[in-house]
Amino acid sequence: MGTSRCLRYDHAMSETSTRESIKALALELLIRHGYRGMSFGDIASGLGTTRANIHYHFGNKQQLVEEVLADYVERTLAGLARIWSGEGRTFAARIEAMVDFSRERYRRYNPPGTEGRPWSLISRLRQDADLLTAGGRVTLKRFGDELTGILVTAIGDARARGEFDAVMPVEDVALHLVTLADNAAPITLEAGDFARLERLYRGFADMVDRAFAPKRSAVARN
């Protein structure tokens, strides 16, 4: 009986490991090559398995992509929520943390000397939204909607604590940040490096501070 249980346990662990390995490589290929450039054949070759094994775990390409995207969006939202949750950090410090968060992902796919490559799954799959399942398209929309909610709550709390003047338009500020986050990868692709995105984030943080920090707002009114 003990041996039987051990075999079942090992098989379950192997199944989980295989699924995660498939999803990890699919993520890499999707970011680098897009939906059309990712195939079960490439994944099978990269993992030393068969296309039939990938079909066994995920059914078809659309289902695999939908699951990879859902995991990616979940991790991304969780990371951004950590940046914007709680007290103790200024708006500018949170923006700087967003820059660091994006830079880390950018560098994974753009090591020194190879700048200008895609690095965001969300951005990549927006270009191929017509090929996704309905669930995949919902997940893409969910990212923008939930990030907006995270930012509106955090910025509103900061205003309530007195970091910003009461006239600050919370939803407008959040909208600008969501737009930056949504277009982070296209910005770096067009610029050929990360510097422009970093400048845009920091410039926006500075403008918000100049316009709505309480002391400066009081000076402006006088």
Image: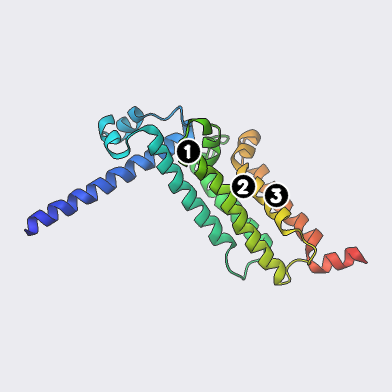
Quarter of the figure with the C terminus: bottom right
Q: What element carries label 2?
A: helix
Answer with mark 2 or mark 3, whichever residue precedes in sequence: 3
Going by the image, does 169 lie left or right of 183? right
In the rendered image, the vertical position of residue 59 relative to residue 204, given as above or below: above
Q: Position of residue 137 (x, y in %)?
A: 51, 39
Q: Is mark 3 on a helix, strand or loop?
A: helix
Q: Position of residue 158 (x, y in %)?
A: 68, 67
Disc 3 residue type (three-letter): His
Q: Give the distance between the C-alpha atoms of the residues marked 2 and 3, in whole angstroms.
A: 9 Å
Q: Give the distance between the C-alpha atoms of the residues marked 1 and 2, in whole angstroms.
A: 23 Å
Image quadrant assignment for residue 213: bottom right
Q: Pick the residue in front: 44 or 203.
A: 44
Outermost residue toward the front in this view: 134
* Residue annotated with mark 2: 181
User: Residue 134: which disc?
Assistant: 1
Q: Pick the residue in front: 120 or 140.
A: 140
Q: Residues within 10 Å of mark 3 (few under 14, many from 20)?
A: some
The residue located at (18%, 51%) in the rendering is 10
Disc 1 residue type (three-letter): Ala
Quarter of the figure with the N terminus: bottom left
In the rendered image, the vertical position of residue 123 relative to residue 40, given as above or below: below
The residue located at (56%, 44%) in the rendering is 141
Disc 2 residue type (three-letter): Ala
In the rendered image, the vertical position of residue 85 relative to residue 107, given as above or below: below
Query: Does the residue at mark 1 contact the one at mark 2 (Cβ under 8 Å)?
Result: no
In the rendered image, the vertical position of residue 76 relative to residue 210, given as above or below: above
Image quadrant assignment for residue 187: top right
Q: Position of residue 208 (x, y in %)?
A: 76, 57
Q: Nearer the viewer, mark 3 or mark 1?
A: 1
User: Residue 176: which disc?
Assistant: 3
